[in-house]
Amino acid sequence: MTTDALQTANPYLQQEPAQEGELEAADAPPAPAASSRTAAMIELVDKLIDVLDRENTLLSRPRSKDLGPVVAEKQRLFADYETMLTQIGSMSGLMAETPPEQKTLLVARAKRFDDALRENELKLDAMVKTSEHIMSVMSKVARKMTQPVQGYGNRGAMADSPKTIAPVAIDRTL
């Protein structure tokens, strides 16, 4: 692999090129690359936890205008996370090369990350269901309130089939 191939736009994935002799026996101390990859993974997971916590807080407030930038940041971090996992290949390979204290830290962060993801999923699901329910109720009310409106036809006489309208306006900040 060339040095150019190791360069990436994702700062969490940048690593040093492999040196000859880096592949050592299993009983040798972990390679610095594994340690730095684990540290990068922990740092990225910490940022994801932070952004999920901020989004979960904002989801508790109705009509929060601050949600847009947080969602954009979350999407960017998840793209970085997905890329990192793809480049690592498998977590078991990384964990085999990682020092025990970093393993413990990574496992703890993974648990916290999973908890934040579950909370986020529940809040987003509740928000979607609430929005769907509101739209359903508004649609039913609009159908009930639809009143025929008499209009004039081409010849100046009352039209045969009256048009119907629903007196409803929807605010996009629902």
Image (cartoon, rainbow, N blue to C red):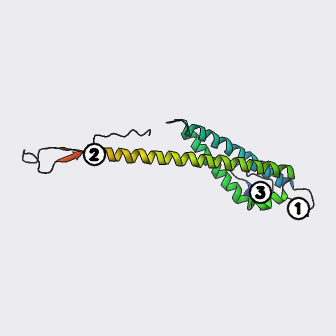
Task: Determine whether label 1 and label 3 are within 8 Å by CB.
Answer: no
What residue is shown with label 3?
3
First reached walking from the N terminus: tag 1 or tag 2: 1
Q: Quadrant of residue 156?
A: top left
Name the side, left or right, on which 159 lies relative to 80.
left
Q: Is residue 11 visible?
A: no
Q: Which one is in front in this view, the residue at disc 1 or the one at disc 3? A: 1
- Looking at the picture, does residue 86 appear above or below residue 135? below
The reply to whether the C-beta atoms of the residues labelled 2 and 3 are less than 8 Å apart is: no
Q: State which quadrant residue 3 falls in.
A: bottom right
Query: Which residue is tagged 2?
Result: 144
Q: Are marks 1 and 2 in contact (CB under 8 Å)?
A: no
Residue 169 showing in the rendered view? yes
Question: Which residue position is annotated with label 1?
Answer: 20
Relative placement, left or right, of 163 versus 126 is: left
Is 128 situated left or right of 102 in this image? left
Amino acid on which disc 1 is placed:
Glu
Residue at point 72% right, 59% down?
87
Helix, strand or loop at mark 2: helix
Residue 21 coordinates in the image, percent (x, y): 90, 62
Q: CA distance from mark 1 to mark 3?
A: 14 Å
Q: Percent x, y for residue 103?
A: 82, 52
**Measuring 77% from the left and 51% from the top, which residue is drawn there?**
107
Work out whether mark 1 precedes mark 3 in sequence or the reverse, and give the earlier one: 3
Q: How far separated are the C-alphas under marks 1 and 2?
A: 77 Å
Q: Nearer the viewer, residue 52 or 144?
A: 144
- Amino acid carrying label 2: it is Lys
In primary-sequence order, the first of circles 2 and 3 is 3
Binning the other alpha carbons within 10 Å of mark 3 as few (below 14), some (14 to 19) or many (20 upward) gives few
Q: Nearer the viewer, residue 132 or 78?
A: 132
What amino acid is labelled 3 in the image?
Answer: Thr
Disc 3, SS: helix
